[in-house]
């Protein structure tokens, strides 16, 4: 986007909302900020209605701060807790219907390639575990098979949290939840492995407690989608409301599951993506030296 | 590929340089899309889709369309065209019968999101039992999605309506999806002599910024923008916002009338105006009705015809005017539920004998004699 469109008309300056003025004056567009700059710039998320201690809200805040080029990034979401937050995000974003996010993103990405052949418009899908692994799985996987240049990010809270904590395909086996009154009867879906086999060039899981790793994998995933092929990031985002723990325990919960190995952290990188990402590192080193 | 020049809709639609073609309805779809300057077409080969969307694929191979893909199922295809349309390009797709119902959640989503998508519905029967035969029952389901609905009688209508649909759909004060319906098999698989416009002209490109809703491209303000935000808080402002949005979609449909009048030459077409018995029909039932009326008139019965070209917006005023002096109206339909009969009943402003017959369905063709019988019966009452 041209930064010109973001300037305020002087005649309107006195009536513009403060948060908008802040976005113009201290926003991250074109600045190359990352997670370590949080607190020093105006974030793209302006307040939000999610529960106190929501792991998903934390993950989303870190994801949005990690986008390599926010001013050229469009997000496609889906129904769920995250969609309640998206009206508050200062990026163009789409909510269509529950589960069709990767299909909408496919059409959008292709439209962007036609309309802006000389620009990279990053299309990033951000949706919950129900939208990604259950109701939308066919469209998610088909977009991978077709090698659409999309980044798919799942905010995994292991339940349908927004409808009151029902079992999802990403809930762990034996967990008692609504609609699983005697405990879930099959294992957590191994979506990272499915993604790898379905043709994703970059796959990573990460916990919402690990901000540095979120930044690293989100950047690598978006850049891979831009230049190599589809990418998938799965972020463990514990839900205090439905899993009934205290809101201040969210980060500890995420850390504990990572430590005891019940939420495994993996990274699968294709040969093409590996050489591309290594090339980027070399370039960065070279730039630093000069 | 023939080099095409963009011309204004008015020039394209009034061009007198026509050429005759003897083609199927599916090929008429291809001919319309060829001149429509479509950016992206997305297809799905459902049985019972006609060959129209793979013919559109040939247009892509020849360079008339910039982007084309086969989607994975109808819900996905309708989502893919929605994403592309929100991204600011002109899109086209087609479906029919079970495919229409599989895709259904997207149709009201399109109109709610004010997307000017043009979709051809080449109608077929619905399951169960499994069928691929002609029937237009699916149209009953689409009536209240907020989409505009045109119904083609033959291949010529299908060609004309599709080309004009893009222009009407994209008017900034309309900006609503349009379904162009044609009865599967009867129109899609039979050859007909039609007139098409010169191959070297096409419609102007779609301008995504000439729209009541911003394109989702991170190139325009407001930047804090969600398509489409939830309005689901439990308070009066939320209810009022949702209600007024729905009313605005309906109002946009109403505002299309002046463009439909201009480009389609009216929502209805009346022959033998003022006749005692009128037959009212849309789609291919019009052709049989025309024949039945001819025969009735030869028998000395004063019969006339109202052809409905457009079902949404519904031509309430036109129908009431055409039935001012009639004593009965016969409504033949290619479905079992009689959705057109219901629509007309609800629109009538005076007491008149309305006959919801004949109805044929399950794949049968409509014998002219059945319509003629109904006309005779009205005449003898």
Image (cartoon, rainbow, N blue to C red):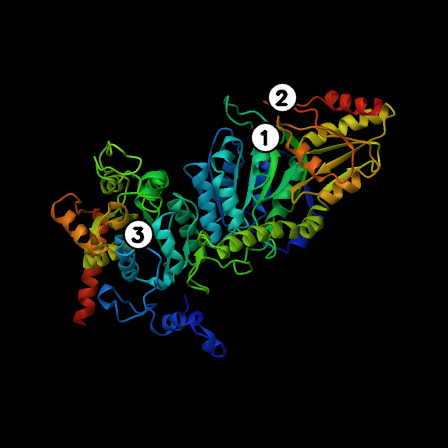
Residue at mark 2 to residue at mark 1: CA–CA distance: 13 Å
Q: Nearer the viewer, mark 2 or mark 1?
A: 1
Residue A239, above or below A117: above
Which quadrant of the rendered structure holds the C terminus of chain B?
top right
The numbered mark at residue A225 is 3
Q: Are marks 2 and 3 on the same chain?
A: no
Disc 3 chain ID: A
- Residue A234 shows which numbered tag? none
Instruction: Say which chain tag 2 marks.
Output: B
**Between discs 2 and 1, the one toward the N terminus:** 1
Q: Depth check: give the residue in front, A197 or A252.
A: A252
Query: Callout 2: helix, strand or loop?
Result: loop
Going 66% across and 39% down the picture, which residue do you hit?
Answer: B157
From the viewer's side, name the closer residue of B245 and B65.
B245
Q: Is residue A37 above or below residue B174?
A: below
Residue B92: x and y in percent read: 52, 44
Q: Residues within 10 Å of mark 3 (few under 14, many from 20)?
A: many
Q: Which residue is mark 1?
A: B137
Image quadrant assignment for residue B210 = bottom right
The residue identified by callout 2 is B364
């Amino acid at each position: 986007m041209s930064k010109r469109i973001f300037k305020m008309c002087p005649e309107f300056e006195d009536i513009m909302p403060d948060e908008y003025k802040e976005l113009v004056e201290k926003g991250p567009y074109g600045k190359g900020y990352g997670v370590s700059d949080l607190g020093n710039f105006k974030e793209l998320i302006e307040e939000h209605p999610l529960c106190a201690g929501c792991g998903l809200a934390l993950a989303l805040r870190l994801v949005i701060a990690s986008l390599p080029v926010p001013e050229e990034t469009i997000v496609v979401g889906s129904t769920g807790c995250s969609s309640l937050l998206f009206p508050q995000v200062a990026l163009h974003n789409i909510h269509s219907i529950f589960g069709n996010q990767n299909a909408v993103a496919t059409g959008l990405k292709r439209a962007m390639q036609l309309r802006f052949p000389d620009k990279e418009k990053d299309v990033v899908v951000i949706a919950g575990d129900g939208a990604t692994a259950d109701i939308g799985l066919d469209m998610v996987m088909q977009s991978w098979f077709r090698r659409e240049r999309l980044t798919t990010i799942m905010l995994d809270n292991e339940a349908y949290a927004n409808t009151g904590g029902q079992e999802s395909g990403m809930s762990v086996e034996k967990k008692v939840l609504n609609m699983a009154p005697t405990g879930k009867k099959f294992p957590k879906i191994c979506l990272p492995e499915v993604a790898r086999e379905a043709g994703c060039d970059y796959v990573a899981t990460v916990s919402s407690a690990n901000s540095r790793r979120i930044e690293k994998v989100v950047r690598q995933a978006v850049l891979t989608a831009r230049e190599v092929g589809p990418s998938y990031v799965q972020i463990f985002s514990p839900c205090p409301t439905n899993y009934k723990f205290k809101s201040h325990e969210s980060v500890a919960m995420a850390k504990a599951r990572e430590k005891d190995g019940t939420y495994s952290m993996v990274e699968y990188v294709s040969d093409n993506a590996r050489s591309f990402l290594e090339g980027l590192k070399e370039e960065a080193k070279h730039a630093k030296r000069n | 590929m023939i080099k095409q020049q963009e011309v204004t809709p008015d020039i394209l639609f009034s061009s007198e340089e026509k050429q005759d073609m003897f083609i199927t309805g599916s090929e008429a779809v291809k001919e319309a899309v060829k001149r429509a300057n479509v950016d992206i077409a997305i297809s799905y080969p459902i049985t019972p889709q006609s060959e129209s969307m793979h013919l559109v694929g040939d247009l892509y191979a020849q360079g008339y369309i910039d982007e084309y893909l086969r989607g994975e199922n109808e819900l996905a295809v309708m989502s893919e065209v929605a994403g592309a349309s929100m991204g600011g390009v002109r899109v086209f797709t087609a479906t029919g019968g079970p495919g229409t119902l599989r895709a259904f959640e997207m149709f009201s989503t399109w109109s709610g999101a004010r997307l000017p998508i043009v979709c051809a519905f080449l109608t077929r029967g619905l399951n169960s039992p499994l069928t691929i035969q002609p029937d237009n029952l699916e149209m009953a389901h689409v009536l209240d999605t907020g989409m505009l609905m045109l119904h083609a009688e033959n291949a010529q209508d299908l060609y004309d309506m599709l080309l004009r649909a893009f222009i009407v759909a994209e008017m900034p004060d309309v900006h609503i999806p349009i379904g162009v319906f044609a009865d599967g098999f009867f129109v899609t698989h039979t050859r007909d002599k039609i007139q098409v416009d010169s191959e070297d002209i096409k419609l102007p490109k779609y301008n995504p910024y000439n729209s009541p809703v911003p394109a989702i491209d991170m190139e325009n303000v407001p930047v804090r923008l969600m398509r489409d935000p939830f309005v689901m808080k439990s308070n009066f402002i939320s209810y009022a916002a949702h209600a007024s949005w729905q009313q605005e979609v309906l109002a946009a449909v109403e505002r299309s009338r002046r463009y439909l009048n201009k480009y389609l030459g009216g929502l209805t077409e009346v022959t033998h105006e003022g006749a005692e018995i009128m037959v009212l029909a849309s789609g291919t039932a019009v052709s049989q009705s025309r024949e039945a009326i001819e025969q009735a008139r030869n028998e000395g019965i004063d019969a006339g015809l109202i052809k409905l070209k457009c079902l949404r917006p519904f031509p309430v005023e036109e129908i009431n005017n055409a039935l001012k002096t009639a004593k009965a109206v016969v409504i033949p339909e290619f479905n079992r539920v009689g959705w057109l009969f219901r629509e007309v009943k609800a629109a009538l402003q005076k007491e008149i004998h309305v006959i919801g017959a004949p109805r044929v369905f399950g794949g049968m063709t409509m014998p002219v004699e059945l319509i003629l019988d109904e006309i005779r019966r009205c005449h003898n009452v």
